[in-house]
Image: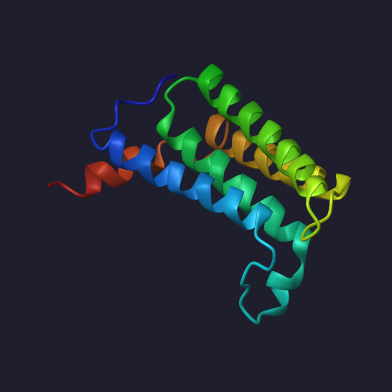
Amino acid sequence: MTAPELRWRPLWLGLGWVWVALVVYFSVAPAPPVPDIDLFRWDKFNHLLAYAWLTFWFGQISRRPLTRAAWALSFVLLGVGMEFVQAQGTARRFEYADMLANSLGVLAAFGAVTFGPMQGLLVKLERAVQV
């Protein structure tokens, strides 16, 4: 089953690329700002959430499962790559656990948008907002 074409696809893609840029920035920034909430101090949860969001978002934009799988693989590779970038500097640390958390986030979101109840949310939003 393929999703209907999105009317605002360029907007959704633009927002997605902004989020990719933010994930890259927060991956290499020396001391990213975090809210003073205990939940946000759990680093691995942040990794999982960030990569789940990217996969979820681009999975909403993509119509075909194979394209969604390509996005998912790209985000796994991005997460691995960011860890190697962090290993080159002194501000951040290389961690296999971060790679795992990133990949688990990708896997969870991929399943939700490809096989689960999260399919087509942007299509539903576009239908609800008639402009």
Q: How is the image coloured?
A: rainbow
Q: What residue is shown at x 42% (from left), y 24% (from top)?
A: 63
Q: Is residue 28 left or right of residue 98?
A: left
Where residue 127 sits: x, y (%)? Answer: 23, 42
Occupied quadrant, residue 69: top right
Q: Is residue 119 visible?
A: no
Identify the residue at the far bottom of this view.
Answer: 36
Where residue 71 sits: x, y (%)? Answer: 56, 28
Identify the residue at the far front of this view.
Answer: 89
Viewport quadrant of the N terminus: top left
Q: Is residue 40 visible?
A: yes
Figure check: 121 above or below 9? below
Where residue 80 sits: x, y (%)? Answer: 75, 37
Identify the residue at the far left of this view.
Answer: 131
Occupied quadrant, residue 61: top left
Where residue 54 sits: x, y (%)? Answer: 55, 43
Q: What residue is shown at x 55% (from left), y 30% (from top)?
A: 114
Between 89 and 48, the residue placed more toward the observer is 89
Q: What residue is shown at x 31% (from left), y 26% (from top)?
A: 4
Q: What residue is shown at x 68% (from left), y 71% (from top)?
A: 40
Between 55 and 65, the residue placed more toward the observer is 55
Q: Is residue 95 left or right of residue 68?
A: right
Q: Is residue 102 left or right of residue 96?
A: left
